[in-house]
Image (cartoon, rainbow, N blue to C red):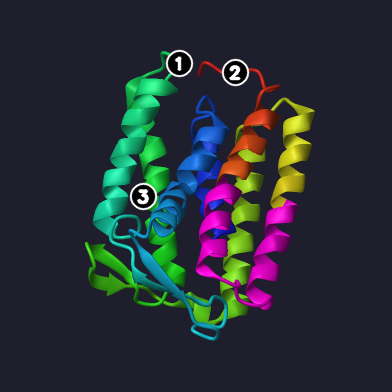
Amino acid sequence: MFVGHYAASFVVKGVDRALPLWVLILAAQLLDVIWAGFLLLGVEEIRIVPGYTAANALVLVSVPFSHSLSAAAIWALVAVMAYNTFVQYGRVRGTAALVGAVVLVHWLFDAVVHPAQLPLYGSRFPVGFGLWRYPVASTVLEVGLLAGSVAFYLRTARPRSTLLRRGLLVLISILAMVQVVAVVGPPPPSVTVVAVSGLLTPLAITAVVFLLERGEPRRLT
């Protein structure tokens, strides 16, 4: 899953308006950032197999440290501690659990679209419902999750900055188009390209949201 991951960010932002949106955006793709880094370091392994599923050509050969359920839970805990330490702004510490929940939901969303290649523990007991076998259904799900969550966020959080509102609408439109192109286009040319794009794209999206959010008055409640 790609753009669908960001749905959790907008829903949680609608629930707790004081949480920085850029933090939630990064949390939504934290596992993929870690995964991309591990690919570049040779710690984890994937293969590109055209036609492996109708919507995605990636085979997760070994991803125990980024995309097992046990690892996802650990990274979620790390995110909670990092938020409490570096981004808390003096607020109630329990709200950081929402950041960890966004990290963990990433794995659950992936389990919906991946075939049985997401391990529960280490490299053991792989699971996955395989919605990527049905490209139209998986694309509609991802884009629908993103659009619905943004609509929920705009209705509940009511961002005051016009730049933030318009910028987010442009951003999600671009993400939706990228999602469609990723499904109908050719497979990536190499694992290195997958890893570099998997590392830089979420960080770039986080940076854009951070800049858009700078003009939004901070809410204390």
Closest to the observer, 45 or 175: 45
Give the amino acid type for the residue marked by disc 3 in the picture: Leu
Q: Residue at x 44, y 75 (%)?
A: 47
Count residues near mark 3 (Cα–Cα under 10 Å), then give few for <14, some for 14-19, many for 20+: many
**Residue 39 visible:** yes
Q: Position of residue 217 (x, y in %)?
A: 65, 18
Q: Secondary structure at mark 2?
A: loop
C-alpha span from label 1 to label 2:
11 Å
Give the amino acid type for the residue marked by disc 2 in the picture: Arg
Closest to the observer, 61 or 132: 61
* 73 lies above or below 57: above
* 220 within the magenta span: no
Q: Can you name the residue that lies furthest to the bottom here? A: 51
Residue located beneath label 3 in the image:
104
Q: Which residues are magenta?
A: 173-202
**Residue 1 visible:** no
* 162 lies above or below 126: above
Q: Which mark is residue 218?
A: 2
Residue located beneath label 1 in the image:
89
Residue 166 picture quarter: top right
Q: How many marks?
A: 3
Upstream in the sequence, badge 3 or badge 1? 1
